[in-house]
Image (cartoon, rainbow, N blue to C red):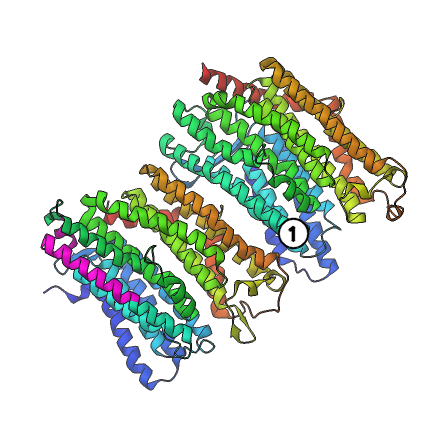
Amino acid sequence: MNELPILSILILLPIVGIFFMTLIRNNNDQSSNNLKHTALWISFLNFLISLYLLFSFNQQDADFQFEERYFWIEYGISYHLGVDGISILFIVLTTMLVPICILASYDSIKFSVKEYLIAFLALETFMIGVFCSLDLVLFYLFFEGGLIPMFLIIGIWGGERRVYSTFKFFLYTLAGSVFMLLAIIYIFITAGTTDVSYLLDYNFTRNEQIVLWLAFFASFMVKIPMWPFHTWLPDAHVEAPTAGSVILAGVLLKMAGYGFIRFSIGFFPEASELFAPLIFTLSIVAIIVTSLIALVQEDMKKLIAYSSVAHMGFVTLGIFTFTVQGIEGSVIQMISHGIVSAALFLCVGVVYDRLHTREISRYGGLVSKMPMYAFTFMIFILASLGLPGTSGFVGEFLVLLSIFSINTYFAVFATTGVVLAATYSLWLYRRMIFGALIKDDLSEMLDLTRREIIIFVPLITLTIFIGIYPKPVIDIIEPSTKKIVSQVNGKLN
Amino acid sequence: MENILHIIPEIFIFCSALILLILGLFIKNIKLINNLAILSLLIAVALVINQPYQSIYLNSYVIDEFSSLFKIMIFIGSIVTLVMFVSSREDLHINLYEFPILILLSTLGMMVMVSANDLLAMFIGLELQSLSLYVLAALNRNSLLSSEAGIKYFILGALSSGLLLFGISYIYGFSGNTNFNLIAVNYNSESLGLLIGIVFVLAGLAFKVSAVPFHMWTPDVYQGAPTPITAFFALAPKIAAMGLLVRFLFNSFGELYLDWQQIIFFISIASMILAAFAAIAQTNIKRLMAYSSIGHIGYALIGVACVSSEGLRSLLIYLMIYLVMNVSVFTVILSLKRNDAYFENISDLSGMYKNHPFATILVALMMFSLAGIPPLAGFFGKFYIFVAALESNMVFLAVVGIIASVISAFYYLRIVKIMYFDEPKEEFDGLNIRSLQVLFYPSSFLVILFFSYPAPIIQLSEYAIKSFY
């Protein structure tokens, strides 16, 4: 076995970085550059460590790997970490997006750079912690702790209505999560432990499952977010700084999807089966309604935010089919959405940095001034609508396949969502990029800088690579997914 | 005649208060008196730690794990107050040598409270504590608000003492004893008079811990009293009264818990909900902290309402964390000084992070901790409370507590919002006074780093509840 506590290193390294950064004074441009470089290198180092984790991960093994367990609070609540084929991808996604976010904020954050970077690194710690904790209390700690830096990131560096948005974000999420806390405590009392690997084999009674499932659901449905509790997301996205939106769409939403897979269906399969029609209905409504809402948006970020809700609708659809295909599709959809929506928000950030507006009607004909930008934007728009050959297709296809095997009607409605996604995405693209360049203030627009190209290249590569050859990703996910599905079926029968 | 040495810490505090009182007449150096008072409190800590556990004076005075832990918490509260006094005594016009002496006497009263195992000892301790506090609240004679606070506290406090005494007489009348353990043996559980007695004593004690519906004095007294005194109110007397409440209920009426449990149940819910809503509208930070403390007492009372070892354990954990968080917050309140004038309006904090980035992040984290957001210490306090509540099948109490904590998150976040999101105002002096830094940084780091090593606090509370279970 691997002796190195690599998961703890991943979690603690950003904290160490924060410690160093508090020692750097922030009084002039030079020092604020130092701060940015420090944060960038630390997060990049974390990315390299997570790659090492990925390559030393045993793909045949469906169990948790790199486990660490220490005494923490008391008997039954321990500091227990571990990854399996599902969580490891989210960890790599997180560590990949954080340096990109920091790089993307090099010019756009003008004041309090030090606090900003510290908040980001703290957020990284919490996000990684969510995906590798194998103890419910530890999970809750990271899950909720991430609210603090995100609250500050939106509230301090956000747009005009930032205070309203950040309060809404915080209180919505908190209100949902506290019920999960009560459920966790209940589990601790009845099962005697909050250890995930133990609880996966534990059988709750049917009534317990229903109540606990609803408590977990309250938290995850707000976070993922599902219709009708999605309204905090567009607000938060619009007001957050670019990098904040990237992390919000790229990682924070995935915590809830991960929670659904790991806890909701892992612990409470009977209740999940019982409530699956509810989830399907809400997801279908979300896919169709939010796609229609996205069609009429004037604000680019809002449009992408609503499209996120629709995409996450596919994720929940896939998870609650309890099939290997469905869950794999959901995970790939989440990874893909993590990359693509992050990139789309970065694309918005690129033009926002130049023109300082997100109104779609202020743009038009950008292709003649910004060809490289137009190309990049096109790839991600196509990936977002699920064009074959991009990562968006793989996940959506697997999800639709699995939902079709369960219920044809749901599949038909879900497919409508794909058409609507194409409509609003392509229309957004047409309004911004094509047409004649008639607006005066656009004539000065510059194409992508070198820093921006560096940001986009890895994202484009991954989008296309996963789209054309998803096998490496599926190989990692498959054993763990199969194990989850067989466990669920075993409990159900 | 039992040996007087059994209560050496109490006697030591008493003697040092008297000696300092005489010294103060001749030495005009108030700082020296204050430092001597701090020193005697530190010595008292050592004395308490080394005290053998026993019950003395016909079992009317108990020295056990529980009382020792509470005494140490009270000493910490008193020491913190005296350290705060150093930095603010001149600007707040409370530069009187009586201050440390009154604190010592009040501390003595609280020591008697947490060790009392007899209705009379309990009353004596409570009165000694309260009388010193009445004077302390009105210590700033030039301030109308301070005098008002003193008078208000005195009148309502006298009323509550009256209720308490009334209840004591009933209990004595219907059980024939004043000793907690003998009451437990001798009462007639059918008698209504005993129940009336319990209700009145609980009303008196609820006043001391400022639980709804006996909380009305708290915001006014918190606002009017000089800030170090307000800190003292928040830190020591509430904790002492809570210890007394627990011993009174568990030792004398442990069997009768079905009767008093519902009272605690009600005042706990009422405190949590009222505080959560009332604090939203506050503009003065001391008033806000008053409501915040009412809410926290509501949570702590859940621990009492559980009537279980888990409940008591969670109560102790909660009180310890509450103590540390309040030390940090009140030091910050004491540092809000601009051009030699203290300010207490929350809006004056706006844009604090521009001038004091490091202190502000700590204050913000304290606010998140008070709101119970992980991974800060406040979360663990609430976590244990809810574990105890669910273990005793008090789901309703837990759900109300959870909802109240979300609502109260709103007003804590408002402070964070004002510090971070609003336009900066003129710079204020902030935490550059060393005596405040000594309190602020350690307490803040304790709260932030609690999650990494929570075992000592938990073991300590498990050790302390051995007195009951």
Task: Write the residue at 64% across / 20% down.
Answer: A399
Q: Nearer the viewer, residue A17 or A320?
A: A320
Label 1 lies in what chain? Answer: A
In the picture of the structure, the residue carrying the numbered disc 1 is A116
Asked whether residue B118 is in view, the answer is: no
Which quarter of the figure has residue B17? bottom left
The range drawn in magenta is B156-184
Residue B73 place in picture, x, y as percent: 34, 59
Secondary structure beneath label 1: helix
- Residue A181 location (% of width, % of height): 45, 38
State yes or no: residue A317 in magenta.
Answer: no
* Quadrant of the frame with the C terminus of chain A: top left
Kind of residue at disc 1: Tyr
Q: Observer-nearest residue: A69 or A27? A: A27
* Spot occupied by residue A56 in the image (x, y as percentages of width and height): 62, 29
The answer to whether A21 is drawn above or below residue A370 in the figure is below
Residue A390 higher or lower than B283, as above or below: above
Residue drawn at the location 12% of the way across and 58% of the way down: B58
